[in-house]
Amino acid sequence: MSRLFKLLPHPDYAMKFSFSVVYAILAAVAVNIFYQPGNIYSSGLTGIAQIISTLSESWFGFELPVSLTLLLLNVPLFFIGWFKIGHKFTIFTGITVVNTSVFMQLIPIEVLTTDPIICAIFGGAVMGAGIGYALRNGLSSGGLDFISIAIRKKTGKTIGSISIIFNFFILIVAGMLFGWQSAFYSALAIFVCGKVTDAFYTKQKKMQVTIITRYPDRVIHAIQDKLRRGITIINEAEGAFRHDKQTVLLTVVTRFELPMLRQAMREADQQAFVSIAENVQILGRFYEENL
């Protein structure tokens, strides 16, 4: 598939558009096949759009489609993305939101089951996979993702955990308007969605890497050739068994970069000892590519 995109005038843009379509299909499936039949309210602006769509008949005398409501709610938040995150990111997010609205209209509401637990679990998993897939490929589903990403850049918290906090408001409103049973099932869906998002969006998971090697220059060159990461050198380390002199290298990578790190170590020093600690917190500067 990537070879096909390279034949196009702007292969990167074509790939991002395809990622956008994949997310739009997953989001539409989650809403129309699981959330709506199970009376489950989604996370983010999609959940708010569902609430407004449900109330629109009593407010305006006719039901506003979820797809149109979602599109209108995203418009003011594009300004946050434009000034706080990145112009290209915001443009492609706009395309993603439009695609999502289109597919929500095209994919009919299909009742596979009305069991709210099944709808909450599978709907949350499908929606979370879509959001994580979009973020992993430099896109956003729009809405609260703009705010979540801006907060993550300041605090270092994960996208999933930030979304769970924001979505607590949706649960309260859904419970007050439509009954607390619906709110509890929606909470399950939001929790599953947040966890699946974190599982897919591996760029936010940081890992501390300790490398003990006899060839530090070769290892440093191989790592920095593949990754944009700083490395701290500790010279004159001594092995306790043979008392041989080695060098300790310290760096921090994301889980997304781990395969590239492994490849670099295979090329530079296959005999090196590498220790990896997961879920580290960073207080200093840590490079993250612009979205």
Image: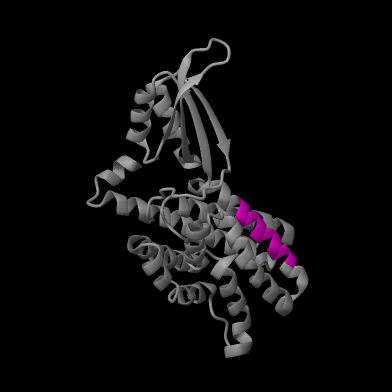
Residue range in magenta is 184-195
Dividing the picture into quarters, in which one does residue 79 lie?
bottom left
Q: Main secondary structure of the magenta part?
A: helix
From this viewpoint, is residue 101 visible? Answer: yes
* Residue 280 coordinates in the image, percent (x, y): 56, 43
Outermost top residue = 242
Outermost left residue = 9
Residue at the spot 54% in from the left edge and 70% down from the top edge:
45
Outermost front residue = 236
* Residue 246 coordinates in the image, percent (x, y): 46, 19
* Residue 61 coordinates in the image, percent (x, y): 59, 89
In the figure, 162 relative to 63: above or below?
Answer: above
Left/right of residue 161 with respect to residue 232 in the rendered view: right
Left/right of residue 184 with respect to residue 51 in the rendered view: right
In the figure, 128 relative to 44: above or below?
Answer: above
Asked if the stretch drawn in magenta spans residue 18, the answer is: no
Left/right of residue 289 with respect to residue 125 in the rendered view: left
Q: As rendered, which of 94 and 156 lies closer to the eye?
A: 156
The quadrant of the rendering that contains the C terminus is bottom left
Residue at the spot 59% in from the left edge and 79% down from the top edge:
52
* Residue 281 coordinates in the image, percent (x, y): 56, 47
Residue at the spot 44% in from the left edge and 39% down from the top edge:
257
